[in-house]
Amino acid sequence: MKQTADQLTVRKINTVIVLETLRKLAPISRAKLAKATGLNRSTISSIIQSLADIKFVRETELQLDQIGRPGMLLTLNPEGGFTIGLEINVDYVSAILADFNGQLRRKLYRSVNTKMPQHEILMTAVRMATTLVELGQEQKLPFMGMGIGLPGVTDSIAGKLVFAPNLGWRNLDIGQLFFKEFNVPILVENEANCAALGEYRYGAAKDVRNLIYLSAGVGLGGGILIDGEIFHGSQGFAGEIGHMMIERDGFLCACGKRGCWETYVSPNVVIENVRKSLEQGVVSSLTPLLQRSQYALTFRQILDAAEQGDGLALAALTQLGQDLASGLGNLVNIFNPAMIVIGGALTQAGHLLIPAIQKQLSGQVLAAEHTLVQLLPSQLGVDACVHGAVALVLDAVMRDPTNWLT
Amino acid sequence: MKQTADQLTVRKINTVIVLETLRKLAPISRAKLAKATGLNRSTISSIIQSLADIKFVRETELQLDQIGRPGMLLTLNPEGGFTIGLEINVDYVSAILADFNGQLRRKLYRSVNTKMPQHEILMTAVRMATTLVELGQEQKLPFMGMGIGLPGVTDSIAGKLVFAPNLGWRNLDIGQLFFKEFNVPILVENEANCAALGEYRYGAAKDVRNLIYLSAGVGLGGGILIDGEIFHGSQGFAGEIGHMMIERDGFLCACGKRGCWETYVSPNVVIENVRKSLEQGVVSSLTPLLQRSQYALTFRQILDAAEQGDGLALAALTQLGQDLASGLGNLVNIFNPAMIVIGGALTQAGHLLIPAIQKQLSGQVLAAEHTLVQLLPSQLGVDACVHGAVALVLDAVMRDPTNWLT
DNA sequence: GATATAGTTTGTTGCTTCAACAAACAAAAA
DNA sequence: TTTTTGTTTGTTGAAGCAACAAACTATATC
């Protein structure tokens, strides 16, 4: 049931608007904030005073060179607090310290692997987070919270990992575990959803509220933003776009079904197809690589060969573009997003794939002449998720800033 | 940009909550409203007074048989106003007059066909609406607005039909046309979205906030509710689930693509497949029907035959169930809805199809052991859309009741 | 010094909550 | 049957809070 409103509600709504306006337009004076928001100048003064008291906002300099009393410019205070964004994935743990503007201040990265026990990976993550927290606390900054991105189904309300097939983890109350360690709000989310949020707040999809993010790694995950919010579905299981079937009785997928989109477009599949062609004697500059060791062939190598004009590599990427377009056509028809961001391992091939996808896409999309959808490679790359984890925290703070008032 | 808040905002939010609570719990006293909402008893009294002044709420009777002062029970006033729900589809125009509770008071139905000029169909719709409006006005009820459902892409913000391929209409400012005629708010929406809303408010999906509605007619349309709101996408084109490709190089669709889901599951396709089998000499109780006229075969006849044990008909429906499950598996993985409602022409086969779909669905859905999704046939049937059109208006009134205060 | 703009202070308005009180009914006791 | 008690409902007036309008002060430019 919706929450009733009173004077505190009014103040909170207006404080959120002031923070959002500062986020977009800073540096800006009180008078211009009043104009931009429609609030009264005295109301703005009062709200700014409250925010300055908790150090979310600071004055910078007078705005000269105009007739009339110079306005004192205001910005969000990078030293208003710090957040930690954390990503635990199948072969690495990544963590960043970000300031109150969401700007990266420090990054840590550790390789792990799924042979390691869960406890060890979690301890690695806790240690990395502790290192960054200590760094933040050395600067006497308030620790506002931590966001955690995980490669599986998460219950973001309860702060739990439901299951992560690629990690082999199930039913983990990771929010509680980290809360006991750090005693700050812990926000838990799927890694592709985090990455989508990261690109929306700080990356390629800045301020694009209807967005699909493709996360190509072991599988093909997706993050979906609808009206600027992560889309979870009724139980939190939404967004499994890699397991959208695009061909009846198609390739067998690791999930047990046939014809899943990810069996056509994940980088591992591309590699496997190229390897098979080489084994069948197709002439290619990649042939010598196969003779050294079949496990050494990488997506990067295929991309490099394509860039040098290798026929097999180019054909593989063309096919990949077509296969991507098949599934993306479905997603555009169903979601009508304003933008699709290609992340994960496919980002590096964006400049070749995107033209190939676009060529096919208009034949897949209804009302293609009306439909506006941009395709872009990720701007944040492998850091998209941790930036999104930071955004989870900062968005929560911005959504309820009066919670922090003394 | 989000709207700033003031005293009027507080009043509006609380008034909406009171109306929503009355909608769910009426008849109820002021004291119990206070308990249910968390608002103070004097606030409730004040809000109820305002709503009684505009006749949205009325007192019914004292609640006796309990210790303490009897509370005066309150309900929403069915005579608070009336709305008109209208549906213009390829072969009929339907219109209903509904009271302030959304209850149907009168229904009109007219057959039309796509050979008729647009102007004639629109005039038919205007006349039907006028008849109902006069009926409502005879009872001295305020006319709150009209909702219109159309089989195509609509711009619900501008109140326009962008294009409707099955009607052959384009760029029609139908909201303005009806506004000039009736001078009340006109809400325009896609017919499948309307039907989804209708089932959510008054039908099979009562209060189910994450919902997919299948509308099987000439094609296969879909209505999607996310968190109780119609999902439009960034431009209003979302929800084209009939054109989700489920088979590469599959059947040629009327839209020009291949393998669209609607080429497997629309009733016309089922009929065509059965007819072909009969022509090939398959023994069936339907054979005599073919000899009379190939165009007379209807989905209803196939269904009746299946219910009488006809092997061909049963096989056709079994295949249909499997094909429905293929696409539905994708939709459940992507949207994680709580419920799927089967509407349109397939509703009548629901009792046979739903078991067949469910048998297949768990093999299509990831985390099937966790995923809870109900499948139900439409409860409102062909009236789902007009009830949804009514709900568009009443939801708008409920969303902004202070707009009606004197 | 005049003009224009920014920021602060004062007073008003409207909404909710709180506390107190009146009203109305059921239960218990005489 | 009448009276008293207890409980609940609904109303009234005061207090507190936030926003707004008006008035004033501060400050830079021309």
Image (spheres, coloured by chain):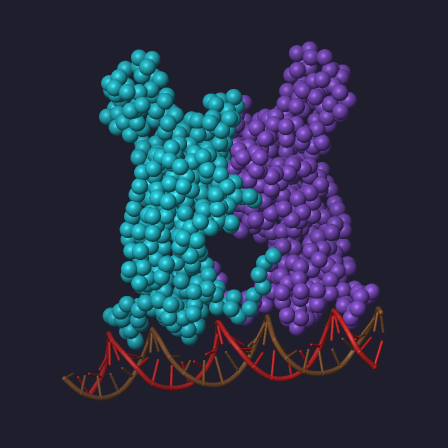
Chain colours: A purple, B cyan, C red, D brown
Q: Position of residue A49 (x, y in %)?
A: 69, 70
- Residue placed most toward the observer, B240 or B200: B240
Q: Quadrant of residue B268?
A: top left
Q: In the image, what residue occupies the spot 73% across and 23% down? A: A306
Q: Residue furthest top?
A: A281
- Residue A349 lies, with reference to residue B224, above or below; the image says above
Looking at the image, residue B119 sits to the left or right of residue A269; the answer is: left
Q: Quadrant of residue B25?
A: bottom left
Looking at the image, residue A160 sits to the left or right of residue B68; the answer is: right
Q: In the image, what residue occupies the spot 70% across and 64% down? A: A32
- Residue B85 lies, with reference to residue A302, above or below; the image says below
Q: In the image, what residue occupies the spot 38% across and 68% down? A: B54
- Residue placed most toward the observer, B207 or B136: B136
Q: In the image, what residue occupies the spot 59% across and 58% down? A: B2
Q: Position of residue A66 (x, y in %)?
A: 80, 66
Can residue B124 be seen here? The reply is yes
Q: How many marks?
A: 0
Q: Considering the image in quadrants, where does the C terminus of chain B appear?
A: bottom left
- Residue placed most toward the observer, B234 or A166: B234
